[in-house]
Amino acid sequence: MTAAATLPRPRALTFGNLWLSGALLVVIALYPFVFGKAMNFGVSTLIFAGLAMSWNILGGWAGQTSLGHAALLGIGAYTMTLLATPERLPAFLPAPLAPWWGALVGMILAVLLAAIWGGLTFRLRGSYFTLSTIAVALVLRLVAINSEWTGSSEGLFMPELPTLFGLDLFDRKVEYGLAFAFVLLTLIITHLIRRSRLGYGLQAVREDEDGARALGIDPTRMKLIAFMISAALTALGGSIYAVYLQAFEPHTLLELPISVQIALMAIIGGRTSIQGPLIGALLLSIFGELFRTVFSSANLLIYGVLILAVTIYAPNGLMGLFRRGGLKLGVNR
């Protein structure tokens, strides 16, 4: 029996899903006009929202919890920056690459890493994959710290970049536009996956891997596809993040807390929903900034208690809580 014969026919997108996604995008688009003096916060929040949605393709739809997405983030950031820096170019490149081409190369490298990484670990059960993600991120962090080419522990500084359609990439409003495009892209891809045969296959694997295999679905193949898509998008977010930071080091990009932060945003928002990671990223960023400003040294304690409360009382995330409250927003539909 084949997967094509057993999976249900993909349905059209629900109005509730499209309405909620559209409303969130409108709010995001209006941000620069209302909070033009807080663009740093807006750019970083959108970048992490896109990263959380990218993580959710693997961690939510495929059910494979990764705590090593900082490695993929770093690949995108380092690749784009190195290929744009004349003094650090590989010998086979005669001239620096424009950042958009460097971002594409970073995405390709991330996909290749995900294919090898997943191929070696997806046949294992339980927490082995999660542990492998932590290990890979730590290995890449050590390589970055000990390699002169990557700037070692001092990191890299972004060189002068060519303009994009006449726009300065170091302008915060331009970076906000790039981050918005990143969020829009990940949202569209998630919508397409959710209502495709791939999406149904991923959900089948997430709920019951043995049952999915009995129906003719190849769990390893499904998880690999999800991992490669997630890796490509995460690397793209890493390239945008590098432009935003302008200078970064291994401790900025390749640390475990970065991976945990990305995963938490998706889990708290609702890892099995389309918009959950976006909502989780927006709320956690807002509350994190608020607590840091108002509660000073106690902000991490209050922040942690809030996360713990959401985890206990809303195990399916905020979107699951809304669903139980009667707001039919397209969660798990």
Image: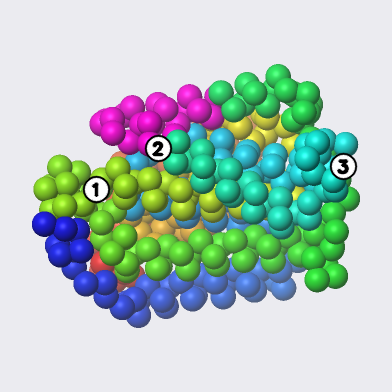
Q: Position of residue 311 (x, y in %)?
A: 35, 42
Which is nearer the N-term, disc 2 or disc 3? Answer: 3
Q: How far apart are the alpha carbons under marks 1 and 2?
A: 14 Å
Residue 177 lies, with reference to residue 158, above or below; the image says below
Q: Position of residue 106 (x, y in %)?
A: 63, 46
Which residue matches tag 2? 118
Q: Amino acid under label 1?
A: Asp
Q: Amino acid under label 3?
A: Pro
Q: Position of residue 265 (x, y in %)?
A: 47, 48
Residue 246 lies left or right of residue 53; in this view the side is right
Which residue matches tag 3? 86
Q: Amino acid under label 2?
A: Gly
Residue 323 lies left or right of residue 156; in this view the side is left
Q: Quadrant of the N terminus?
A: bottom left
Which is nearer the N-term, disc 1 or disc 3? Answer: 3
Q: Are marks 1 and 3 in contact (CB under 8 Å)?
A: no
Task: In the rendered structure, find residue 194 and report the number of the disc placed on it.
Answer: none
* Mark 1 element type: loop
Name the residue located 32 percent from the left edge and 68 percent from the top edge. 195
**Residue 325 visible at all:** no
Name the residue located 16 percent from the left edge and 46 percent from the top edge. 213
Q: Are marks 2 and 3 in contact (CB under 8 Å)?
A: no
Q: Quadrant of the C terminus?
A: bottom left
The quarter of the displayed image where residue 198 is located: bottom left
Q: Which stretch appears magenta? A: 117-138
Residue 130 lies, with reference to residue 176, above or below; the image says above
**Predominant SS along the magenta part:** helix
Residue 192 painted magenta: no
Name the residue located 75 percent from the left edge and 50 percent from the top edge. 243
Q: Badge 3, how many Cα within 10 Å: few under 14, some, many 20+?
A: some
Task: In the rendered structure, find residue 218 and report the number of the disc placed on it.
Answer: 1
